[in-house]
Structures are given as structure tokens and as C-alpha cells.
Amino acid sequence: MDDADLLSILACGNPMLRRPARALTADEVRSSVIQRLIERMRATMYGAPGVGLAAPQVGEALQLAVLEDGPRQWSHLDESERMAREREILPFTVLVNPTYEVVSEGRTVGFYEGCLSVPGLTGVVFRHHTVRVSALDERGESLTQVFSGWPARIVQHELDHLSGVLYLDRVESRSMSTVENFAQLWAGHPLDEIARELGFAEH
Ligand code: NI
């Protein structure tokens, strides 16, 4: 795959990011058009780099998202930061028409997250710790899978994109930081300290 295959990622303010996406049929998923889109989204996610990408972010109003996390994506974190986030290996996963139910009712976890459609910024979002996802996979076959920790955060973030929701709609607004300030001031610090200093509440 060369650079010509990369898709451009829409930034917030673009109304495409605010429209609900439509479901795909299993036949559509198996079509060459969608298979090609999946490959291009995968390459675009790697190139960004990111751990998830939803079709509306590349201008396609379709209920389709790709996810992947692993050492290549978390190389900037030390081991304690990775553990604190519960970042575990998430193999490349395609979710079509996904829905989820909360498994960890009442247990939410706050962490800084970012979005390829909101460049340069990061903020704290409280997410469910564990969710069970029902979807179609890249072959158009039914998939049910439980995600916990950071993979559950990625799933919830990407599924939001499919209904026109950005993390900005859920963020603790007083936590918002440039990526540079986050790296200089807050990386590796406990969330309660950051919450105290910036003046947001922990859930
Ligand atoms: Ni995003």
C-alpha cells in the first residue's frame, strides 16, 4: 500500500462527522468496494498513527470502524503508563453495524484520549470499563466480543463516531489540553492530581 491509498481524515467542524452513519448489509461488506475501503482505512489508521478509525472520519457515512492497538501504537508509553491504562494487545478488528451493552455497570474509568478528527488536543473522558459488542466482521459474519480496559475505550470512542458523536461531547472540558502541554506537564501523573490542578471532578 502506498501513500496514494491513504484517505484524508476530516476534522471537527465538518458536518459529515455529525451525521449518523447507515448500516451495511453482509453482501455489501463482502463487496470489493467495502473490502477496499477497509484496507484503505487500515492503512490510514496506521499512517496517522491511531488506534481506531471510523468511516465517517474519512467521509463515508457507513457503520464501519477499524481498531488495533499494540506495541507499535504504545511505544511512547512506559510500562507503568501502559498498565495504568490497561492497554492490551487488540488485534486488527473490523466492526460493522456495531452495538454494545455495558458489562461493568457503574464502573467508569477516566483517562486522557484524543481523536484524529480533533488534532492537537486531548482530554479526559469517563468510559465504561467493560462492554460486550455485537457486530458483523470483515467477512459479514456475526461477531460478539467483550472488550475491557483501553480496548473498551477505543470501541466506545469509535462507535460514537458512527452516531455523529465526538469525544468532545463527553469530555471533562476543564481537562482539555494541547498534546504538547499534556506531554510536558501531565504525562505519568495520577488523574486525581491533574483533576485538582485543572479543576475537574472525578466520577
Ligand atoms: Ni475519533
Image (tube, rainbow, N blue to C red):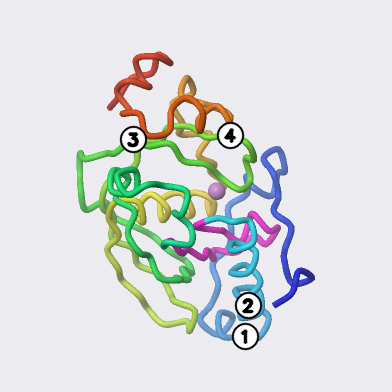
Q: Which mark is residue 110?
A: 3
| The N terminus sits in image quarter | bottom right
Cα distance in 3D space between marks 2 and 1: 6 Å
Residue 175, position as x, y percentages in the image: 46, 24
Q: Secondary structure at mark 2?
A: helix
Image location of residue 33, percent across then percent down: 68, 80
Is 58 one of the magenta-colored residues?
Answer: yes
Using the image, tell me which numbered label, if any, was put on residue 121: 4
Question: Gap between marks 4 and 1, in whole Å?
Answer: 36 Å
State the separation of the CA atoms marked 3 and 1: 39 Å
Quick one: label 3 or label 1, which is nearer the N terminus?
1
Kind of residue at badge 4: Leu
Which numbered disc, 3 or 1, marks the residue closer to the eye?
3
Q: Nearer the viewer, residue 174 or 16?
A: 174
Asked if residue 33 is positioned above or below residue 22 in the image, the reply reads below
Q: Say which element carries label 4.
A: strand
Amino acid carrying label 1: it is Ser
- Label 2 sits on residue: 34
Mark before the other along the chain sequence, 4 or 2: 2
Figure quadrant of the C terminus: top left
**Distance from label 2 to label 3 (Cα)?**
34 Å
Is the CB–ligand 1 distance for label 1 below 8 Å? no
